[in-house]
Image (spheres, rainbow, N blue to C red):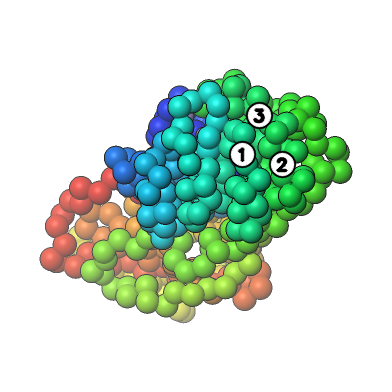
Amino acid sequence: MYNLHSHSLLSDGVLLPSEVAVRYLSAGYKVIAITDHADYSNIDLVINAILEFTNHWPKDSRIKVFPGIELTHLPLEQFKPLAKYARRKGIKIIIGHGETLVEPVIKGTNRAALEADIDILAHPGLISDAEVKLAKKKGIFLEITSRKGHRDTNPHVVEQALKLNARLILNTDSHLPEDIIPVQDLLKIASGAGLSQKEIDNIYQDVKGFLRERGGVMKKGILVPVFLCSCVLVLCSCAGISKKDTVPKEEALLEPQAALKFNDIPAPSGFKFLPEDSYTFESAGVRVGILKYQGRANVEQVVNFYKDQMPLYNWNLLNLVEYGERLLNFEREQETCIVNLSPKGRNITITVSLGPKSVIRPKKSDKPVK
Ligand SMILES: [Zn+2]
Ligand SMILES: [Zn+2]
């Protein structure tokens, strides 16, 4: 179950994105998009914040969160450039705030939004035949909403979409905790708007396919933007992985080992230390070393292990690169630590490289802790 239209305190919602996600999970949803209102004044703030959030949301969480945006009350000519901008920045779900009857939306908004690169036209009010045809031609979803006021024209939208064979989607458009309604209530809204069970099923199948496409695009290349990094690693140029985007299965968390070579660099228990392939050197407070481990696990489990454990020793994750292998790049005041995971099926070789930071780097970065 999905909901691809929700607001957080990044615009006029009241909850942090993480609370939005957690509340949807507990209401029975598996996939959501957080789509805060934006115009020229705040589009960068909203995009950067939501991407920062979704990039850090655990990949193995039971709810997947897509970064989205809702282009709202724009002068008509701004829909195209802002949709294009959001898409280029990596926003996956772009909503146009349609001509609901309960707000003074500029006349012509439905059409201007449909002509832009949007995915969903929200609460399109008394949408015309010509607009529905344009939505159909471009594969844009018309929204059936549970939001009070906006939902009054649901029956009209359903009738138009069925008549002209356009795509429909069910969304909550939540702003407050009480708007995050259980899945069953959203389905009731859909049937109340005139959709049969079969038609609702078709909508779900269609949206599922759409999300698969969006998810597939999402995992290509580098997952987290690469921060400038003067250190050892310039592997960043090897982008282009082609992993299928399956929502990772839930797996047990790995535990850290008790005995460690460096007591501030954890290794997952069950992994064997390979002394032959490792070396360490420590002098006058400078540490250099390569530590190798081998063991069996799912590679995502090991990625999550390092993401969870390293911050406990004040290591900040700078970036995560996927190119078949996984590369996690951590740093601390004086040192960098690179964790390379090389999987062969479930056999994984971990190579941890530790070294001092290059001298030109300023001691303290004013970047927030990743
Ligand atoms: Zn709003
Ligand atoms: Zn909205």
Say which residue appears at 66% left-offset and 73% top-offset.
345
C-alpha distance separating marks 1 and 3? 9 Å
Say which residue appears at 59% left-offset and 22% top-offset.
149
Dot 1: element: loop
| Residue 153 image label | 3
Dot 2: element: helix
Say which residue appears at 47% left-offset and 69% top-offset.
221
* Label 1 or label 3, whichever comes before in sequence order: 1
C-alpha distance separating marks 1 and 2? 8 Å
Q: Which residue is mark 2?
A: 160
Give the amino acid at mark 3: Thr
x, y percentage for residue 112? 47, 48
C-alpha distance separating marks 2 and 3? 11 Å
274 in relation to 53, above or below: below
x, y percentage for residue 198? 86, 43
The answer to which image quadrant residue 344 occupies is bottom right
Q: Residues at badges 1 and 2 in contact (C-beta under 8 Å)?
A: yes
Within-10-Å neighbours for mark 1: few <14, some 14–19, many 20+ = many
Give the amino acid at mark 1: Ile
Within-10-Å neighbours for mark 2: few <14, some 14–19, many 20+ = many
Mark closer to the observer (1, 3): 1
Q: Which residue is mark 1?
A: 127
Give the amino acid at mark 2: Gln
Relative depth, front residue between 154 and 180: 154
Dot 3: element: helix
